[in-house]
Image: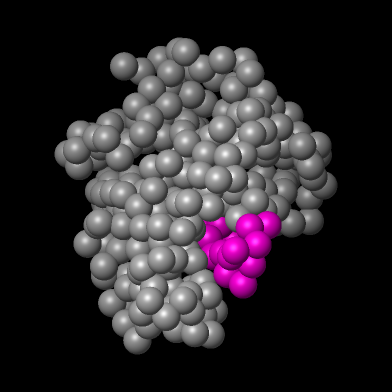
Amino acid sequence: MAHIAKILVFDSGAGGLTIAREILAKIPACELTYVADNARFPYGLMDDRELIERVSRLMKELVNALNPDVIVIACNTASTIALPHLRSSFDTPFVGVVPAIKPASESTSSGVIGILATPATVEREYTDQLIRDFANSHKVFRFGSSKLVEVAENYLYYGKIDRQALQLEIMQLCKQDPTNTMDTIVLGCTHFPLLKEQLSELSAFSAIRWIDSGEAIARRVHYCLGQIEHSSKPVNTTKLRFVYTSKQTTAEVMHIHQHYLAKQLKSSVEHQILDTP
């Protein structure tokens, strides 16, 4: 009997759903567990040591319970801070999420790139190193926006878009470029692809290419799974599991997350609250 790939996608909130959706598009026949550590959302407010201890403790419990084939840390903050420790502590392969600076540098025609992420991500040395490694010959501007996380969550949960706020946040990035030739913007927070369609509809930025890491992460997960024959299995073998750490998680939130991932799939779905402090 063919092994069905077991994939664990981990985030502090809903942003990682954009990564999980890309994985399901690439690997529809799998057992995917989406874990939201929403009791401690957002991770950007935690200091590095606390975050590493928190994620490591949760991951030990999850690995023991679920025995996943591959784990995706679908949070830029957790990836840049905790990933090295996780890889040294577990045998399971880990895939991290980092701003898609390399593909952006390959896509730009003007050589002017913007990075739109959370304030914590744009300020990290890890982002500086990615720019040095992959975009050293380009002009790169950055803007850290917490507001866009709020806009993205309002859209996901309530279907409402604050287009004025959306445009103002993008303008904060673009106005840094005195040549007005920025043609590629990296969506460096997993929340931001939730707004990709709305961003592309902004007439003032119609020439912009919006780059995120979702497809690249899905390809990497596929690679890590190796020779597991998932693509030939029917889509009704998909199994989704949602795990939350906050006891305040409502049935409505669970339904929205389920709808976002499962609306195009025939799948079995279960929800669980993890009993953790």
**Vertically, is 4 above or below 221?**
above
Hey, which quadrant is residue 245 in on the image?
top left
Spot occupied by residue 29 in the image (x, y as percentages of width and height): 72, 47
Side of 184 relative to 237 (left or right): left
When asked about the image quadrant of residue 254, the answer is top right
Looking at the image, residue 89 sits to the left or right of residue 272; the answer is left
Magenta region, residue range = 201-218
Indicate the position of residue 160 as horizontal and vertical percent values. Answer: 64, 34
Query: Does 99 sit left or right of 2 as displayed?
Result: left
**What residue appears at the point 80 percent right and 37 percent down from the top-left corner?**
266
Q: How many marks?
A: 0
Instruction: Please indicate, yes or no, whether residue 71 appears anywhere in the rendered image.
Output: no
Instruction: Report the residue at 36% width, 58% height from top.
Output: 143
Asked whether residue 89 is in view, the answer is yes
State how the image is colored.
one colour
In the rendered view, does 106 fall on the left or right side of 143? right
Quadrant (top left, top right, bottom left, bottom right) of the N terminus: top right
210 falls in the magenta region: yes
Please, is residue 131 above or below residue 98 in the view? below
